[in-house]
Amino acid sequence: MAFVQQGMARHRMGDLQGALGFYRKSAELVPGEPNTINLIGIAARQLGDMETALAFSAAAVELNPESPIFLAARGATLAEAGQLEGAVQALTKAVTLRPADAISRRNLGQALCALGRVGEAMPHLREAVALTPQDPEAQLALAHGLREGGAHAAAAEAARRALSAGGEVAAQARFLLASLGEGKAPARPPQDYVRTLFDNYAPRFEAELTGTLGYQTPDALAALLRRAGLEPEGRLDVLDAGCGTGLSGQALRPWARHMVGVDLSPRMLDVARQRGIYEALEEAELVTHLAAHRGTYDLVAASDVLNYLGDLAPALNAMAASLRPGGHAAFSLETGQGAPYALGEGMRYRHDPAHVLSLAAATRLSPVEREEVALREERGAPVAGTLLVLRRD
């Protein structure tokens, strides 16, 4: 057990690789020891090695299916891997066996919210706050649940309590408050919020978008490219910006001689990689990638991406710089009016197309085609959108 103790000491210090090394040494000496197996799974999850984390968390529960500790770790791992139904089962059993486990209560509530089962989630989120009233992460999780359930005043109150944490939690709380109309919308969302949102969304992204929400933006943008006179002849160097799982890349592939996908979410990229349609995939922030690839692309396309940015001036400047003369930028907007951008209750930005076109003109991007469309459905109502194709002078 000395190796386990050394591993736990390293774990507490934040040295995950060191901790994992000691846990594996212990597992070699005492094969099949369930606590060691569980710890390997936890360290692997925190390192982002979900394949190992899933395997070891399952093995620990198989060895002791009544351990609330093992069930809690298994549920957290399944939730992080996007396997939400399995996560709910494991976490429900964990909190039944150990009702005062505030973290598992919070994880269970968040998994239920992600499945759209907000009513079932709320008692667990409230109990997590009751058990740990000073925990800003519990307050933030409750705030998101309340917002999903339409209790906006209560959501804002919980988000304000989360502000005390500072750092990333406070940034996310401020972003949520801005979406509820309290405070000025930031120029962009917290980067970790976007990455986590889409990491968790990756396993069910396509089924939900295309099946439940009627999402057709990539195909509509491809049709607009044809109307703009760009024939799909397979000759262009294409960037699929915010490529997600590759739905947009699939629509763009007929134009591409060489296609690169870039996204913040590693799990989205894992799904996109399985399509085999990209020459390269890169985990990066959009503007950072564009700025590093000046004069590289003939076409930069962004389907359902710019609604996760507020101020579009940096993105449009970077798009223009990344295009060769005569190249094109094609993207969708959630349509707003009046203000250059506004943050909606869905925590996405709406943009006034007239303002976006004025920004584009300043970067030598000229409009070629435009179409007003419904991008998807949200709460049973169509989301108004604008598709634009612009040419680099």
Image (tube, rainbow, N blue to C red):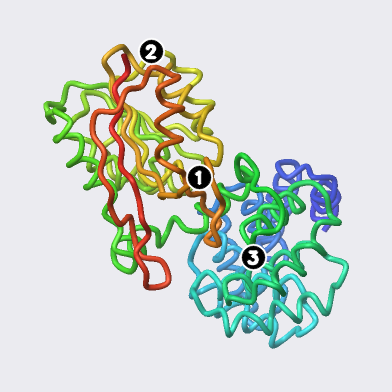
Identify the element where label 3 is drawn.
loop
The location of residue 100, given as percent across then percent down, is 80, 81
Q: Pick out the residue farthest to the front.
A: 338
Q: Are marks 2 and 3 in contact (CB under 8 Å)?
A: no
Q: Sequence order check: which comes first, mark 2 or mark 3?
A: 3
In the image, what residue occupies the spot 55% across and 49% down?
342
Q: Which residue is mark 3?
A: 32
* Marks 1 and 3, how far apart at CA: 34 Å
Q: Is residue 194 shown above or below 325? A: below
> In whole angstroms, how far apart are the C-alphas of marks 2 and 3?
56 Å
The local crowd at label 3, few if under 14, some if 14 to 19, many if 20 or more residues have their Cα within 10 Å, is few
Which badge, 1 or 3, comes first in the chain's sequence?
A: 3
Residue 265's disc number = 1
* Quadrant of the snapshot with the C terminus: top left
Q: Quadrant of residue 204?
A: bottom left
Between residue 151 and residue 103, name the one nearer to us: 151
Element at badge 1?
Answer: loop
* Amino acid residing under circle 3: Gly
Name above or below for residue 95 compared with residue 147: below
Relative to the observer, which residue lies in front, 255 or 229?
229
How much space separates mark 1 and mark 2, taking CA atoms?
25 Å
**Picture coordinates of residue 39 (x, y %)?**
71, 59
For mark 2, give the secondary structure. loop
Earlier sequence position, callout 1 versus callout 2: 1
- Provide the residue designation for mark 2: 295
Q: Nearer the viewer, mark 2 or mark 3?
A: 2
Q: Residues within 10 Å of mark 1 (few under 14, many from 20)?
A: many
